[in-house]
Image (spheres, helix red, strand yellow):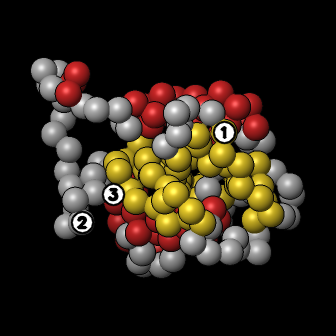
Amino acid sequence: MKKSATLRPPVLAAGGIVIRETPEPLIAVVRLRKDKSWVLPKGKLKPGEDASVGAQREVMEETGYDVSIEGFLGSMSHAEGSKLKIVQFWRMRAADQTARKLMDDVTAVKWLPLQQAIDTLTRPHEKAFLISVGQAALQAAEPLARDATVEPAAPPVFDDRGVSKPNVFFEAIRAWFRRWAA
């Protein structure tokens, strides 16, 4: 029996829901040069690259801002041509000022309140994702004292830099595809 010619490893990517702290917190959306679509800042991982490191790199390239990672928000997947694309997202906080020029693929960055950011996004799967995690991303910026008595569903896992890590599902998929391709 032959392996299916159409089964390909997924494209692995990472990005951020990037918050600027203002009286009304603002979320970054970026405009792509190639199709003029408004998207969440994200990009493909380099081979062997840690997803959170890749997310921070891609967000800094696409927004021009230095960012700090504050926690894992979730993953989304969608078909991109004949391939499956899996994107992990972290909540990130932007520095006050831009630190670098935008990469050539991006023509603009907008900082918008949550609902305007959702309305501005071009791709339906990104709109749906931001609808599902947007409030959690904004609330993470608020003091956690009010939640001190609430027991978390599962204890968070942190890497060496103190950044919360996603569950092992993503890494299990990556390992499975490595074994399959071998």
- Between the residue at mark 1 and the residue at mark 2, the CA separation in whole angstroms equals 29 Å
- Residue 105 lies, in percent from the top left, at 76, 70
- The answer to whether residue 131 is above or below residue 30 is above
Q: Which residue is mark 1?
A: 112
Residue placed most toward the observer, 49 or 23: 23
Q: Whole-Å distance between the Cαs marked 1 and 3?
A: 35 Å
Bin the neighbour count of mark 1 within 10 Å (Cα to Cα): few under 14, some 14-19, many 20 and up: some
Q: Residue at x 86, y 57 (%)?
A: 35
Q: Which residue is mark 2?
A: 161
Note whether residue 97 is visible: yes
Does the CB distance between marks 1 and 3 fall below 8 Å?
A: no
Q: Secondary structure at mark 2?
A: loop
In the image shown, does 82 or 156 lie closer to the viewer? Answer: 156
Reading the image, the residue beneath label 3 is 172
Residue 16's x, y, as percent? 51, 53
Front residue of this view, candidates 143 and 15:
143
Q: Nearer the viewer, mark 2 or mark 3?
A: 2
> Which sits earlier in the primary sequence, circle 1 or circle 3?
1
**Is 80 located above or below residue 155 in the figure?**
below
Q: Give coordinates of residue 33: x percent, y percent.
A: 83, 64
- Picture residue at 55% right of the left edge, 32% below the top: 24
The percent coordinates of residue 10 (x first, y second) are 55, 61
- Residue 124 is left or right of residue 177, and the answer is right
- Amino acid type, callout 3: Ala
Residue 128 makes an appearance in the image: no
Q: Give the quadrant of residue 101.
A: bottom right
24 w.r.t. 97: above or below: above
Q: Amino acid at mark 1?
A: Leu
